[in-house]
Image (cartoon, rainbow, N blue to C red):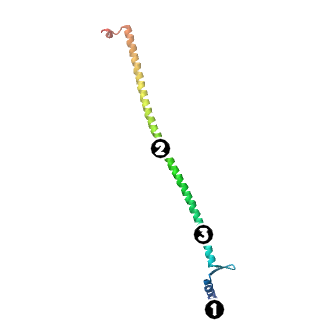
Amino acid sequence: MMLKTRQETKEDEDLRNFVAPLGITEFGEGEEVSESESDEEHEDDLAESYKEVRETIIRLVQENLALIKEKQRLETLAESLQTELQAERKLSQESVLLMKEKLSLAVKASNLENELHVEKGISTQLQSQREIGQDPVLWED
């Protein structure tokens, strides 16, 4: 048996050596597949892979372009909002200054009203004294 196994192994090796130069590399369910058929399948697989990679790259480039446009739009919007914010801040500061000035003027007006009231009181008192003639100092001249 050992002799047959060595013989069969040698025959298998001889067959492989004979078939290899012919380009027959595999046997599959009764049909043989040559290297050229295997190469064609490999090329088909490579072509399919290339198409998938190409489509993926195209999709990624389109997404990238869309993101670039969106980024530019958002940057423009941010600049516009920043300009509006600065204008609002300036307006707010001016408004605060106007409120302070209004408050200051209201205090001055109140003080002037108080002074006016006091002066009217003094004037009324002086008028009364004049009519009564009680203030000899005013009439000495």
- Residue at 56% in and 60% down: 60
Query: Residue pushed farthest bottom?
Result: 3
- Residue at 51% in and 51% down: 72
Residue at numbered disc 2: 83
Q: CA distance from mark 1 to mark 3?
A: 49 Å
Determine whether 20 is above or below 62 in the image. below
Determine whether 41 is above or below 134 in the image. below
Relative to residue 63, is residue 131 drawn left or right? left
The residue mark sitting in front, 3 or 2, is 3
Q: CA distance from mark 3 to mark 2?
A: 53 Å
Q: Position of residue 36 (x, y in %)?
A: 62, 77
Looking at the rendered structure, the kind of residue marked 3 is Ala
Residue at numbered disc 3: 47
The residue mark sitting in front, 1 or 2, is 2
Looking at the rendered structure, the secondary structure element under dot 2 is: helix
Relative to residue 121, is residue 15 drawn left or right? right
- Residue 3's disc number: 1
